[in-house]
């Protein structure tokens, strides 16, 4: 894969991670979240939205409170917490879930999409006592995640709980290499998981459409195919990170919401690796100004219903137009090529 293509994928990852209301966040599923251009305080919008701060039980089709949610959290082997990477409210509530679990479950593990295998090796033998110490080690390895800005509350809760931390992502170069060479180049354990989880024609078409729309119509067939493989590889990595490091009580995943969807994300992979598993998924979802009923949000996920066990609605982050950002980048690339 060329350097130019790598750059384009990285920019797409940053842009799509910033798209609000697009449930897939496709490129951010394939490539690490790239830092926002603006470094000022995060501004939240729609804090008074009718759905903001409400928790929707998808199966029961009703709103529940934190206490009702907690009962199901305690009885689950795997708790998957989906997020929009730059939303501080999502991280606050992820930290709340971990704090809540730690009150009754002293022995659990937490796998992070934001920690690569190389970073995992760097922290596995360290007795880390603070999030600042952890972030210092993670930042020694280029990953593209803004840990201090976004993940400090979650890290604080994990360390306070005494839970073990594990990587749930390949290093960027490893992922690029697999995407370039194809599925057969993946490590044997990952290939085995992928072969158990083939994508049917219908889902493949839906995924391709999602990627195309999420990239403002600027992704070609080759890029779409690469991103689909990258997404599947990362889902496989995450599922194995959970199964291989599950403690007696529970294993927790912190990842982008698209990874934790029940219909074709990590839960599907998990169920085949651990058939007796009880899995609970919470999708933290930003509200939209033009969507005031729960039913409005299923269409964002190209699904008949919200693909989670629970959806926790939150305010949204104020962001620039992602498609305009992409157009400017592509224009610069075109001008550089012409010259």
Image: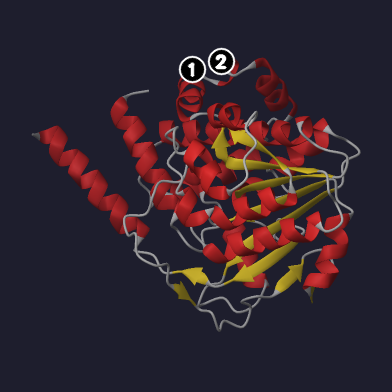
User: What percent of the width, then of the height, locates residue 125?
Assistant: 65, 28
Residue at 76% in and 33% down: 245
User: What percent of the width, then of the height, locates residue 85?
Assistant: 52, 54
The reply to whether residue 209 is visible in this rendering is no
Disc 2 secondary structure class: helix
Compared with residue 144, is residue 322 higher up or lower down, i.e. above or below? below
User: What percent of the width, then of the height, locates residue 167?
Assistant: 62, 34
Residue at 74% in and 62% down: 310
Residue nearest the viewer, comparing 88 with 9: 88
- The residue to which callout 2 is attached is 185
- The residue to which callout 1 is attached is 181
Whether residue 159 sits left or right of residue 335 in the image: it is right
Compared with residue 3, is residue 59 higher up or lower down, i.e. above or below? below
Residue nearest the viewer, comparing 252 with 335: 252
Disc 1 secondary structure class: helix
Compared with residue 42, is residue 228 higher up or lower down, i.e. above or below? above
Residue at 25% in and 47% down: 329
Task: Check contact, mark 1 vs mark 2: CB within 8 A.
Answer: yes
Whether residue 204 sits left or right of residue 62 in the image: it is left
């Amino acid at each position: 894969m060329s350097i130019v293509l790598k750059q384009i994928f990285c920019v797409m990852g940053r842009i799509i991670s910033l798209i609000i209301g697009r449930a897939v966040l496709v490129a951010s599923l394939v490539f690490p979240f790239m830092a926002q251009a603006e470094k000022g305080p995060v501004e939240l919008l729609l804090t008074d939205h009718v759905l903001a701060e409400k928790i929707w039980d998808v199966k029961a089709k009703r709103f529940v409170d934190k206490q009702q949610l907690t009962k199901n959290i305690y009885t689950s082997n795997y708790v998957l917490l989906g997020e929009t990477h730059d939303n501080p409210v999502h991280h606050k509530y992820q930290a709340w879930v971990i704090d809540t679990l730690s009150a009754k479950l002293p022995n659990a593990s937490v796998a992070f999409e934001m920690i690569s295998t190389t970073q995992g090796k760097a922290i596995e033998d360290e007795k880390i006592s603070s999030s600042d110490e952890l972030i210092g080690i993670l930042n020694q390895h280029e990953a593209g995640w803004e840990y201090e800005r976004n993940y400090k509350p979650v890290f604080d809760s994990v360390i306070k709980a005494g839970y073990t931390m594990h990587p749930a992502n390949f290093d960027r170069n490893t992922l690029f290499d697999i995407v370039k060479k194809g599925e057969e180049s993946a490590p044997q354990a990952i290939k085995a998981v992928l072969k158990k989880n083939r994508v049917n024609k219908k889902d493949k078409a839906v995924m391709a459409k999602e990627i195309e729309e999420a990239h403002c119509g600027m992704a070609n067939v080759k890029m779409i195919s690469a991103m689909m493989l990258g997404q599947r590889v990362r889902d496989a990595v995450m599922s194995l990170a959970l199964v291989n490091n599950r403690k007696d009580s529970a294993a927790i995943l912190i990842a982008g919401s698209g990874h934790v969807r029940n219909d074709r994300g990590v839960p599907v992979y998990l169920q085949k690796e651990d058939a007796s598993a009880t899995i609970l998924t919470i999708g933290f979802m930003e509200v939209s100004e033009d969507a005031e009923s729960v039913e409005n949000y299923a269409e964002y996920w190209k699904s008949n219903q919200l693909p989670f066990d629970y959806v926790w609605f939150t305010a949204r982050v104020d962001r620039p137009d992602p498609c305009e950002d992409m157009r400017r980048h592509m224009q610069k690339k075109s001008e550089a090529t012409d010259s």
